[in-house]
Amino acid sequence: MSDITSKSLFELTSNIKEKKLSSGEITKAFIDRAEKSKKLNVYVTDNFEKAIDQSKKFDSNPNFDLKLPGIPIAVKDLFCTNGVRTTAGSKILNNFVPTYESTVTQNLWSQGAILLGKLNCDEFAMGSSNETSFFGNVQNPVGENLVPGGSSGGSSAAVAANLTPVTIGTDTGGSIRQPASFTGTVGLKPTYGSCSRYGIVAFASSLDQAGPMTKNVRDCSMLLEVISSFDQKDSTSIDYKRNCYSKELSKDIKGKKIGIPKEYRVDNMPDEIEQLWKNGISYAKDCGAEIIDISLPHTNYALPTYYIVAPAEASSNLARYDGVKYGFRSHGQNLIEMYEKTRSEGFGDEVKRRIMIGTYVLSSGYYDAYYLKAQKVRQLIKKDFDDAFSKVDAILTPSTPSSAFKIGEKTNDPVSMYLNDIFTVPINLAGLPGISIPAGKDKNNYPLGLQVIGKPFDEQNILNISYALEDKINFKNDISDWWLSE
Amino acid sequence: MSKNSEYLIERENKQYEVIIGLEVHAQVTSESKLFSQSSTKFGAEPNTQVSLVDAAFPGMLPVINEFCIEQAIKTGIGLKAKINKKSVFDRKNYFYADLPQGYQISQYKYPIVGEGKVILDMPNGQKEIGIERLHLEQDAGKSIHDIDPNNTLVDLNRSGVALMEIVSKPDLRSPDEVNVYIKKLRSIMRYLGTCDGNMQEGSLRADVNVSVRLKGETEFGTRCEIKNVNSIKFMQMAIISEANRQIDLLEEGKEIDQETRLFDTKRNETRSMRSKEDAHDYRYFPDPDLLPLEISQELIEKIKSDIPELPDEKKKRFIDKFNLSPYEATILVSDIETSNFFEEVIKNSDVKLATNWITGELFAVLNEKNLEISQSPVSAKNLSKLINLIKDGTISGKIAKTVFEQMIDGDQDPLIIVKEKGLKQESDPKAIEELINKVIENNSDKVAEYKSGKDKLFGFFVGQAMKESKGKGNPQLINKILKEKLNG
């Protein structure tokens, strides 16, 4: 039955609706594979027993009108799940079991999906390799001792390794697109305000967005359709008419104007990335798209801007983890000592580093020079895109400046780690939708991704372009199942 | 204000002026909190009015309570202030056990309400106090240190409750002005229904900024902020104590440190809480969970059209329409319940008598029994009946006081009391004449004395006649007939 787990979401839902497969069979297949895939370390918490029960319940009274009928799905451990431990990859939430459900995951369950478990991620989504997780690093199924990207590393690995049909991650500076790129999967960060942030452990509120991570573009459109919704519980959620993305999915992109930003040709970019990009451009041309050279002049400032804005918000968002109300608490002689010990022991190094950066840039005397200036630059970056989108319908770039690297390779060099986000960060700063699709491989046979960036709320367009490119690229992820145990 | 009423603190040949600015924290009257739907009801069991948002659970987000916004706008209009069409919620970051988020959502650079003013009625005229701004913010929870000997307990019922911080300009100059200012602010907000002003329940508290300078000096001195004072009396005590402390320092040739202080009510002195160097760096920044608050002109107009008559306007109307003195009008409008009571009474009775009876007898009873006018033992309806009995001569003012004393006991109808006790005034001239004749007959020696020029005896005859009537004789009639008899 191993071919069940390699099926796409589209195939699985069709099989269920056609009664070729039951939810129970599918759920069991994914659980069986997960039991043999512990080496990948994708799960922080599994929900297998309950998932089996729920799949049986679905099968006894199936509702085929739902968009995810009886489909088992594992999600990033940043989404609060009612009654199921939610850790955000941190010791400080090691024992935290929410009594509430995030809106995005609720949307999944409302459409018939079943929670398989919670997937590993960088601590509080801070990282680009899943190495900052309290629960250990995740192996990239593409190759042993290779990082799966981050922060949604457990999610990307789980999709690539066929441990969940699809998943949802969160993306603050590239945390969906970069791991998708590293694992040969598809990941979409929607427009800011498309998916509710309610019930998602916050990293940087003005940048965080949940999004689908899937095997292909069609699955991505199906999942986006389910998770994107207006939510009054999130004041930054935007009330607009959302497409039926899967129904309106089309490969016809003839006449679409696709921008190629010259500033994304960064120094020391590997030739294979340059080649990948060129291939992408020619495929787009083949599909009838018009290629237009554009300029996004403030691109160079995006990364430093991001590393001021995101830590600033994080330093404040993470203040609530103080040992007083829930989560890990260390003992102290007084309140201050309890705070200091709890937070020193409860947070990992990368989280502490960002809290310190954030605290620094917001401090009086530094605020204007850092935070305020970063906000101004953010506006300029946004304006770059506004100007570009007056000429083009979408923008095509590489997703990352390199392929997946070895575990431990960059852990002692935060800046080189941060550089991983160079192509993805500007999109978060501008609040735009961006998708990474697998587009080729490097000399080691590791996957590489291309990113399509769209106008606000224009997810349909970038999905369509990706759908067309996907067809031309015809990417095959050859994963050997090297990690499987008996 | 005239010079002689200035509040000055004297030191050998020197006179110091006290400069006071207040930051009043007024709890917004609202069923639910500023960013969550939890109840704000006072006095509930600890931690029973706490939502996941109030307790800052992971992934919880604030959603603005629009009613609180309207309340703040309303208050701004009541303070004759500028309503800012765009304002921003900021995070004020600091750690404390009763601050679950690790930050307070407040408004820092861009408050919802800008400059306004409050008019104070001081004994020697009016004084305008400038309002710097009004902003919305969340209250914190409460740390309780005295229940468990080893632990601090936290009650989050207040966590997230909406507060308006109303910042005055440093325009106040005396404890008396502070008293009148707080009462006026409270009165305006109670008229508007935006804050109940209940100081016992903590609905109104203030941080008091105090500095001193020699009389005639134009520069401000270094100020100290006294945190969280929760009654007018304590504010006044704190100001006097703090001003004297500062003056003593200056007199000793020392400098005043700008610092935050606490008022120790038991010892009647302020104590340093933290110096300027130790001041928190709150790292304010715009809350990314909330969009900037935008208020439409339509909403402002709509709220404006719902604004009731406020104390200043009401006072003017009372003076113009009812011919009240400014003093009487000020008393009657100071509290909305009082003014409503007054207007209810005068619907059917004489204004002058109503004014006297409310500000005299009724207030005395309320004071004595420590009651609000809303709890008045005598209803407006029965008080107006009593006033009508005086007005139409059924009873005298003196008898009315006896009747009133009985009315207090269960809001009895004065008509029934008068009837049952036979207190109706004797106003029949014939009957009065008869009893006066009797008095004259019985006191022929005094009559002779009176006629020989001892005018003072007139009062004696009135008294005798009143006594003869068992107190029920119409005083005007007694006077009139007596005069005729004795002088004729």
Image (tube, rainbow, N blue to C red):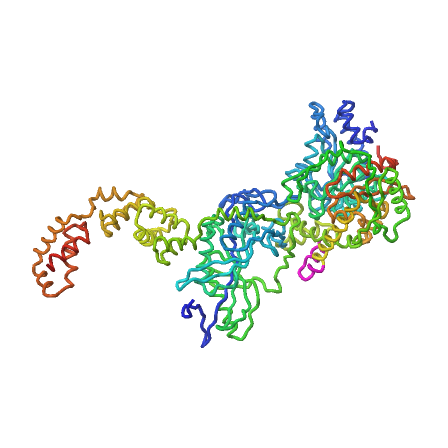
Numbered-mark total: 0
Residue pictured at 88% horizontal, 38% vertical: A286
Residue A429: percent from left, percent from top = 74, 49
**Residue B278 shown left or right of residue A458 in the figure:** left
Q: A348 or A363, which is in the foreground?
A: A363
Whether A362 is among the magenta residues is: yes
Q: In which quarter of the image is the N terminus of chain A?
A: top right
Above or below residue A32? Residue B287 is below
- Which of the 4 quarters of the picture holds residue A232? top right
Residue pictured at 34% horizontal, 56% vertical: B324
Highlighted range, magenta: A355-369
Q: A149 or A374, which is in the foreground?
A: A374
Q: A241 or B338, which is in the foreground?
A: A241
Whether B165 is among the magenta residues is: no
- Is residue B454 at all visible to an observer of this figure? yes
Residue B246: percent from left, percent from top = 51, 69
- Which of the 4 quarters of the picture holds residue B439? bottom left
Q: A119 or B287, which is in the foreground?
A: B287
**Residue B454 shown left or right of residue A60 in the figure:** left
Residue pictured at 85% horizontal, 44% vertical: A291
**Residue A76 shown left or right of residue B435 in the figure:** right
- Is residue B361 at all visible to an observer of this figure? no
Q: Magenta-highlighted stretch: main secondary structure?
A: helix
Residue A81: percent from left, percent from top = 68, 38
Q: Quadrant of the C terminus of chain A?
A: top right
Residue A22: percent from left, percent from top = 76, 24
Above or below residue A15? Residue B78 is below
